[in-house]
């Protein structure tokens, strides 16, 4: 059974949902979409599945592990050369974010950085953004229902381009596409979704519906992520994780916090590729410890219940144990992050669009202390 959910955008959720793509293209009036994906998905054969549904659609497969402004420009150029009229972001968060960034550039003057939240660029994005259909092949980022794209700009900063006009027109969430996701990527993307739900819930902004959705996502992830990691073909676990990832992004319209401020900055470090979900997982225990007093006992009690913990249980320790159980590297040092980089990372975190919605204000030294603990 495929569910239709309308909240922020329209979501088609269920096994076999990919077959609905032609109907959704027709509904939106898109006759020649550009598929934005990556070479890994081409090699895996997953792109063949979408080409079987829309065989005439051209493909841009140059999405990097962390999407860049230059790649957005390449996709926008191919869009024009091929006479396209819409985008399909097919893959993980990188492909979907790149499709959104390219969709802005097709109708808005470069550079893309002028539209970043850090540059107060949201009002510069107008309603004529080219339509995007998002089809996730992982269960984590939630970009399929998100209003933003996180892009490494040409100046080296990793910035969020955020606007209500960047919501995909429809998200097609088919858990079938995640069944062969490797164990390590299943864990990292699932913990990304958990970070979205937890940080949203802990954010001090007031949005009760977002908090309710976030807690439901937490409960689904706690029960089903270990199952999905243990057995990638556990169809119920894969469905539940795709639903939870969607909920994480539906909720994080409320705001995230220091985990994401730091992971965005770390993800922009040159000469390496650091996975966003892995960074979120490693940072979560230290950030939760730093924020505990500001989150407050009432919220922490509700979070413990959603996590299935006893009253008074050590939440940061639980996150650390979950990371170990799911095979996440044991610290930033294991990823090649050097303490000498902490200062610049902390400074960039202060400028991130997630920084203002952390449960309490953090300064550079406090960010450095969190990085040291997570090292």
Image (tube, rainbow, N blue to C red):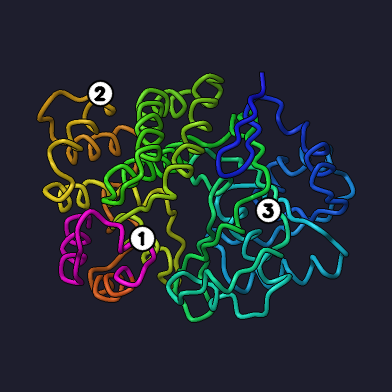
Structural crowding at the residue carrying mark 2, measured as other residues with C-alpha within 10 Å and reported as few (<14), some (14–19) or many (≥20) = some
- Residue at point 42%, 47% (across, down): 252
The answer to whether 253 is drawn above or below residue 225 in the figure is below
Residue drawn at the location 56% of the way across and 20% of the way down: 235
User: Which disc, if any, is residue 308?
Assistant: 2
Which one is in front in this view, the residue at disc 2 or the one at disc 3?
A: 2
Question: Which residue is the site of mark 3?
Answer: 37
Mark 1 against mark 2, which lies toward the viewer? Answer: 1
Q: Circle 1 sits in a helix, a strand or a loop, which is it?
A: loop
Q: Residue at x 83, y 51 (%)?
A: 30
Q: Is residue 354 magenta?
A: yes
Q: Which residues are magenta?
A: 349-375
Rendering quarter of residue 170: top right
In the image: residue 164, left or right of residue 40:
left
Which is more toward the observer, 190 or 171? 171
Q: Residue 363 at x, y = what percent?
A: 19, 70
- Measuring from the top left, give residue 159's x and y in whole percent: 46, 69
Residues under labels 2 and 3: Cα distance?
Answer: 37 Å
Residue 354 disc label: 1
């Amino acid at each position: 059974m495929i569910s239709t959910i309308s909240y922020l955008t329209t979501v088609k959720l269920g096994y076999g949902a990919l077959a609905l793509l032609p109907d959704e293209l027709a509904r939106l009036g898109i006759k020649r979409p550009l598929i934005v994906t990556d070479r890994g998905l081409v090699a895996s054969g997953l792109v063949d599945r979408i080409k079987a549904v829309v065989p005439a659609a051209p493909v841009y497969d140059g999405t990097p592990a962390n999407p860049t402004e230059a790649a957005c420009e390449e996709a926008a150029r191919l869009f024009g050369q091929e006479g396209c009229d819409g985008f399909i972001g097919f893959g993980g968060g990188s492909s979907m974010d790149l499709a959104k960034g390219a969709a802005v550039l097709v109708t808005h003057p470069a550079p893309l950085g002028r539209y970043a939240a850090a540059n107060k660029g949201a009002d510069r994005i107008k309603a004529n953004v080219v339509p995007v259909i998002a089809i996730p092949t992982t269960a984590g980022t939630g970009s399929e229902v998100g209003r933003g794209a996180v892009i490494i700009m040409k100046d080296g900063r990793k910035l969020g381009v955020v606007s209500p006009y960047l919501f995909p027109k429809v998200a097609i969430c088919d858990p079938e596409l995640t069944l062969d996701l490797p164990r390590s990527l299943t864990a990292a993307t699932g913990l990304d979704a958990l970070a979205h739900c937890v940080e949203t819930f802990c954010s001090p902004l007031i949005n009760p519906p977002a908090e309710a959705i976030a807690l439901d996502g937490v409960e689904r992830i706690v029960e089903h992520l270990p199952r999905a990691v243990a057995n990638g073909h556990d169809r119920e676990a894969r469905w539940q994780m795709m639903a939870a990832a969607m909920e994480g992004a539906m909720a994080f319209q409320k705001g995230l916090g220091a985990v994401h401020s730091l992971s965005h900055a770390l993800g922009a470090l040159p000469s390496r590729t650091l996975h966003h979900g892995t960074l979120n997982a490693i940072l979560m225990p230290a950030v939760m410890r730093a924020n505990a007093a500001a989150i407050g006992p009432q919220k922490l009690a509700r979070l413990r219940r959603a996590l299935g913990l006893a009253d008074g249980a050590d939440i940061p320790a639980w996150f650390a144990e979950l990371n170990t159980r799911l095979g996440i590297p044991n610290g930033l040092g294991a990823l090649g992050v050097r303490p000498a980089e902490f200062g610049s990372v902390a400074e960039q975190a202060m400028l991130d669009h997630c920084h203002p919605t952390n449960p309490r204000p953090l300064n550079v030294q406090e960010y450095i202390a969190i990085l040291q603990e997570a090292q």
